[in-house]
Structure formats: structure tokens, C-alpha cells
Amino acid sequence: MPKLLFAILVHLSAINTSFAHEFYFAYAEISYNELQQKLEGTLIFTTHDLERAIAPKGTLIGKFEKLDETSAELKSIENYINQHFQIIYGCALDSHATDAICVSQFSLEGIVTQLNGTIECYISASIPALYNPIQIKFDALMEQFPRQQNKLSFIYRKQKETLSFLLNDSSKYFTLKP
Amino acid sequence: MKNLVLALISLSSAALLAQTKFAQLDQLLPTANSYRTASGAPGNAYYQQKADYKMTLVLDDNKQRLDGTETITYTNNSPDPLAYLWLQLDQNIYDQNSETKLIEVEKMENFRSVADLRKRDFYYDGGFKIEKITNVSGQPLQYFINKTMMRIDLAKPLMPGQNISFQIKWWYNVNDRMQVGGRSGYEYFETDQNYLYTIAQFFPRMCVYNDVTGWQNKQFLGRGEFTLPFGDYEVSITVPADHIVAATGECQNYASILTTEQRKRYELAKKSDTPVVIVTQAEAEAAEKDKVQKTKTWVYKATNVRDFAFASSRKFIWDAQKQTVGNKDVLCMSYYPKEGNPLWERYSTKLVAHTIKTYSKYTVNYMYPVAISVHSKQIGMEYPMICFNGGRPEADGTYSEGEKYGMWGVIIHEVGHNFFPMIINSDERQWTWMDEGLNTFVQYLTEQEWERNYPSRRGPAYMIADYMRGDVSGISPIMTNSESIKQFGNNAYGKPATALNILRETVMGRELFDYAFKTYCERWALKHPTPADFFRTMEDASAVDLDWFWRGWFYTTDHVDIALTDVKWYELNTQNPELEKAFLQQKNAQKDEFIGVTRNVSAITKTVNERDDQIDDFYAKRNIYAVDALDRKDYENFVAKTTAEDLAYLNAGKQLYELTFENFGGLVMPLIIEATFADGSSKVERIPAEIWRIEELKVSKVFVYDQPVVAFRLDPFLETADTDLDNNSWPRVMTPTRYQLYRQEQKKENPMQRQLGLEQLERGN
């Protein structure tokens, strides 16, 4: 029986279960740029949901709209994305044909908050070679909002495939087709 | 004979299977009857029950407790005798034994901190405490509580046309909305130690009994909202004397409640086209400090409403203006604490007025005397004539643009709910989309009339594509019971709103759609419609067979992905040898030449037949592109047999294109094709969805133009929710990804830095 190690927060969170919306939907559009050997893409969240997820006490509510490229909070967003949006793929190490499993490490290149309440996070990760099998974990916001559903469209060589992710099904396999 | 019957059955089954997307909805819809007709209108035997309430309420601001005594008069207009009555006890979802928390699916990952666990187990003594239920003579009535439902057993059945009155005495502890959550409750302001109450679902309410469900007594699990009969209300609300109360209906005793100055302002507001402040911020701030312990009683009356809600606080600022709808003036009002300013004093009441005016245009005239928006942090929730809305600026009074649009959107949406479901009273517990979806659709229209290019979150077709595309295992059809819907927001709000927008802009056109939609609203105003009544009315009033649309958009999780997969180009053969042989010669000359042939031109100085003139015979010497007398004779014969009109058409240089379309997503939709010509002009073709009525997966269509086409584009105005635009064009054009667009548009400075630069420039630095 494993023991759980929790962070101790003294006060009850100010978050409650009734928000003014019932969106609980995030979308990712990721493509592999073979020329630059990069995974590039966009993650779209409901802005306030992401603010709540990153700062459990809700201290960031309304803040993302004011962030600029130098804001420290961008690092929090990048960390959150890397924790909750991972591409685990077959890779070759040191230019040798060594089979290995690598995990994506995305850089957050920028964000744009839209007036309709969404935030677009632009990310990229250097990936010299991408091989099957590819496993995608996309559980962003699910710990805060159990009804959260995420979708991902993966674009590879002009072919697009869309996968969906739920709390009980937050990891999917994707096969690159030549 | 038996074999023949079997063969007939197989044939009809095959026919049914073959005709799936355009199969009529008859098997899915309830059989029309005298209560609800096949046209979608109420039938000649349509009835609805009536529930009138007289209530006396006391709000204890020290204990955050609400006590109530209510007398319900229930009129049985149905043709059925009723042995018992069912009432809703919505507060019981906060009862210790409530199943609402139990049915939540949980994983360990949901609990990452002690705070998460404490929140899960947060104890609050909620739920109704029913003290007694008696008849009007004071005799106790038998009752049984089943979680959020209560059955009152009648001594003898309530016969058709009869009514019964009975009294319930109850109380409950009001929930701390910021801790426990919920659509209603209180918010505590630590800075001035005051409370703001938004009170709803606060009294035992009659269930609906009708021809569709019998008693609609599905348990309240927290999501599927309310199904309520219409009735008249008389409610007295006792609160601290310095509280301002907002409630469903018209206040009957402002004379004894408001100061002389406030009454003057109120009278002024009733005639004003712009907001007039009735209780000022200074008055509210003074009340915040004084905290009077005496009480006052506000008396309200509301006629023909399905529910009653109120808000109360000494923090309230109050403003109002009139909005004329039809030949009546509606008093539009807002109540908000100072924490809502400056957003609320500037926008709330104007938004209320704009909303009821715009909705009245598209649905039915607003039929109540007041419309109220109350500021309530974070949530948005609706009741007859009154709604509770979020949108709070920061403590320093600033707010982001997103916060502003969020506040605008929630007020328009919640005030819009006065029409769906408060007036057009659908069964929310069964079908969320009937109020949220229709309301979100009209919300979109209202937002677009508030500000040009308003950044609406839902409505335009292209905005639903991400949700609908690809793997559909995590989504449900729109026609799913409220409690079982996956992806509630997109399913019950976004997708139906988009579907209606597509009907209006693309399938039916604005004129037909608006007439049919208004007809539905007029038919079912102050009544209880069902999905079938909506589907049938939209067809009945427009003469457009929409069964394929309802079937695809409301009963399946299919998505739109129609591809332009092939383009074939033809020109007409004029039969004129001068033209046609020259054309063939030109085509032959344009053929790609094999590299060996090119190199041999210089490598082989002379071939044998070039050196020896005895080699070439008839075949080698003939010119297949030369026009001879026989060719001319044939053409003369052809011309003699052809009419002048046909000849002119043949010689007009017509360009023929056969386009092939494939349906990858499942949903059939109209084909909107834009052809761009060599001279830069373009033409849009609109092909109705019925082109798919026989072949549902692949169709072709021929287009004839006067000049060559350089490009075709399918769905050029993003009106069908097509989820893959990459296969919509010829020649093929890949849509840039969002990331690529971002990289193209990326600016090195943020707007504030740009503003600083601008200011420096203006200062001459």
C-alpha cells in the first residue's frame, strides 16, 4: 500500500465547482517539421481554467492577459505543459541507430489570449528523429476538472489524425504512417 | 408465400439500411396526438398544470439561514385523476446523504493536496428541514421524501379541473457558494464583513405533470436543471432593514421600503432610456458600515412564472432604465456591490435592455414587467426576471478586456434565459440543449448586434470543428439526457447553437429560418415544448425537410469532413475540323518530350528515312492535322442538322468541370463551392445537401463556365463546420497550422511596449 505525500495547504481553496461555463475542453494541434526536426504546435485552453490549474488558489485569475515575453509566469505555463502534455517516442541517441524512448520537452514560444476566453500556447520541441511507437499523454486540466476532455490533432506528412483524451483514458498511442 | 414474405422483409430492411442519412425521423419521434400535433404545435387537447405560491420568508443574516412558510395551490388541468403530488427538494443535494458526490467518478490524481481532500469532505449541514406539511385546515398531510423528491399522498385523488391547497413549513442553512459551490448561496466579503445572498431553488417546488412524462420526477443530481409548472407568486421577504432586495416580479411596497429620494430616482428610472442610479454607491457603503439589526419586509408579486428567486444584501448599488418592447415598457435593473464597479455601473443595465429587445425580435416579446441582473462572483445562473452574473474587476478597479467580454457574454446569456426556458418552458432536466443551445444561439445574434465582430465564443460554424473532429469516443449526441452528456458545454451549448446558425445561414436562409424559429417560440411561449415540437415546427413553418439535419446533428456524433477529391476538365467538341484538328495539334506539341528524343536531334544527324526518300510511305507522309475536303463535308452536314442556338453554344468556348466530393466525416451538408477564374473573378455555387440523398459517401457534379477555372474551394466561407480544410481545394492548398500563423504574425513587442514606444515617439525622444 503506497503512502501518499501531499502538499499541505492551510486554507481551503477558493475554487468552487460552479463556474460560469461548462467548457472543459482543450485542443492541441501538433505537427512534425521534418526540415527543422521539431515538433511544433498550439495548445488551446480556456484561459481561466489554465489560470486555476497553475495557481490552485486562483491567484492568477485574469493575469494571463497581461503577460508579456519576459513574464515569469510563462515558465509556470511551460512547466505545466511539459507535465501534462507529453509525447513519448522512439528515438535514436547520439546519431547512432540506438533504439531508445525519449520524452518531449517543449519550449513555450509564446501565448496569445483571445477575447473569447481562450489562450493559445505556442510550443516546440527539438526532436532530431521521430520513430514509432509514439505515446501521447494529454491530461492537462483533468485533475481540476474531472470532466475535462482534451483532443489532439497530430499532423505528420500532410496526414492528420485526431485523438481524444479523458480522465480515465489520458494516454493514447499514435502510429506514424509513411 | 413464406419465401416471398421473407424476401419482402429483407428488401425493406435493406432499403432502410441503405437510406440512413435521409431516413425520415418518424421512428425516432413520438407519435403525434391531440396534445401535440404533427405540425409541432400544441394540439386541441393540450393542457398544463398550474402551481400558485404564497410564501413568507425570513432571511437570518447572522446565521445565514432561510426560513419559509409556503402555501401551494395546485390546479389539475390534466384529464387524469392524481393520487399523489410530487415536489422538488433541490436543496437536498447538500444533504449529508446526497448522492451527488457519490456518483462523481474520482481518481487518486484528483487529490493532490490536503486541501483537495478537505474540500471533498467539506461538511455543511445543508438540505431542507421540513417542519410540517398540512392542508389549509392545519391537518397534517402524509408525505415521503425520496432524496430530492417529495411525494404528498392525497386523501382522495385530485380530479381533473380540481385544485388543492396545502402548506409547507421549512428552513435550511444557506450554502457558502464560494466554498460549497452551487447556483445559489451567499458570498462573504471579508473586508467589510458583509454577505451577499443570491437565493434560488430555495423552496419545495411542484414538479411538472404532463402528457409526455407523467410526473417529471427525475432526481436532481446537480447538473440537469429544472422542470417547473407556471403559476402566480406572492412572496414576502423579511431581511435586515438596510438590505436591498431584488426578486422575481414587482415589488408591492417600495413606498414603505425606500427613502423618499430613492423613490424619486426609481420613478425617474422608469421613464429613462439610460440607467438611473436608485441606490448609490455612497449609500451602499454607508450601509456596509452600519449593519442595522432591525428588519424590513419586501413584498413581491409575479404572474405566470415558473419559478421565483431573489437576492439580498446591504452592499447593493441599484440602477435601472426602461426598455420598450412592443407596446410595453420593461424596467431593466442591476444590483451589484461596489466590487463590481466600474464594469457594472457602466454596462450591466444597458446589456439587460439590449438583450430583451434583441431576443424579443427573434423570439417573442418579453412578457414580464422587469428584467434584473445581479452581480454574483464567478457564476452565471438564471431564473424568471432575475439572473446572477459574474464579471468582477480587480480590487484596484482595473479589468482586462477578456474580463469585460466575459461579463458581457454572461449577462446576455443569463438574461436571455428569460426566453429559454423561463417563457418557452422546456424540460431542462431531460434536455439541456433545448434551453442552453437555443439560448446560446440567440445570445450569438444578440452579441453581434451589441458590437460589430463581437468575439463570440460560440455560434460560428468553424468554432465547433475542433470539438467535433476525429475520435468521437468522448462525446455524445445532442439528444442525450442532461445528466449523461459528455462534454456538456460543447454538446449542449456550442453544438446546437452552431447547428441553428448553420440552418439560418446555409441550409434554410435567414428569412425562412427566422420565421420558423419565431413560430416555434410563439407556439410554445408559456407552454412546455419537447424536442419533437421544435423539430416539427421548424419544418412545418418552412417547407424544408430537415429530418436529415436533425438526424445527423442531433442524433449522432458524426462530423463534417467533405473533401473535394477530383476535378476533371472538359471543353465541348465543336466538330469544326479547322478548330478541333488545330487543337489536337497544339495539344500534341505541348506534350512532354522524352529526353532521348531531345538528345537524338543533335546526336543523330540524319536517320535512314531522312537520307532515303524511298522509305516514307503514305502513313509516314500524311499530315493528320491537315483539314481535307471530307472533313469539311462532314462538318457542313453537321451544321445543316444543328440548330443555330446549339451551334452558338458549341462555339462559345464553354469550360466544363466534373467535381467529385467524398464524405469522410459522416454528416451530409450542402456543398458550397467557389470557382476562381483566370481573370481573377469568382463564382459561388450552392448545392443543397439533398445531393447526398442516394449516394451518401461520394457524389459528383458538373459545372459549366465561360472561362477556365484556376482554383476551386469548398466551404470558402467556413459555414459548414468542416473539420479538415486541407482537402477542400483544387489545386490542393494546405491550411497553415495555428503555429505557422503565429510564427508569421509574431511581433517582438507586446501591446504595452508598443504603447510606450508610441509615447516616446510623441515626446520626440
Image: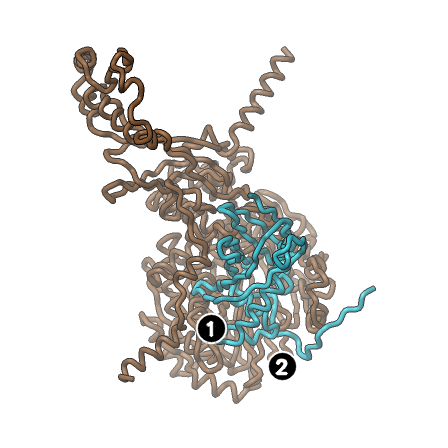
Q: Residue furthest right?
A: A1
Work out whether B753 lies above or below B690.
Answer: below
Task: State the residue at coordinates (70%, 52%).
Answer: B155
Q: Quadrant of the C terminus of chain A?
A: top right
Q: Which chain is cyan?
A: A
Residue B714 appears at what percent x and percent y? 38, 42
Mark linked to residue B62: 2
Co-location on one chain, circles 1 and 2:
no
Viewed as shown, does residue B511 lie left or right of B381? Answer: left
Which quarter of the picture shows residue B446? bottom left
Task: State the residue at coordinates (54%, 76%).
Answer: B196
Q: Quadrant of the N terminus of chain A?
A: bottom right
Q: Marks 1 and 2: which is nearer the front?
A: 1
Q: Dot 1 corresponds to which residue?
A: A69
Which quarter of the picture shows residue B62? bottom right
Amino acid at the residue labelled 2: Asn
Count residues near mark 2 (Cα–Cα under 10 Å), then give few for <14, some for 14-19, many for 20+: few
Viewed as shown, does residue B369 lie left or right of B220? Answer: left
Residue B280 appears at what percent x and percent y? 41, 82
Estimate the spatial distance between the alpha carbons at disc 1 and disc 2, rounded to whole Å: 49 Å
Mark linked to residue A34: none
User: Is B4 in front, or is B396?
Assistant: B396
Work out whether B380 lies above or below A129.
Answer: below
Contact check, label 1 and label 2, Cβ < 8 Å: no
Count residues near mark 1 (Cα–Cα under 10 Å), then give few for <14, some for 14-19, many for 20+: few
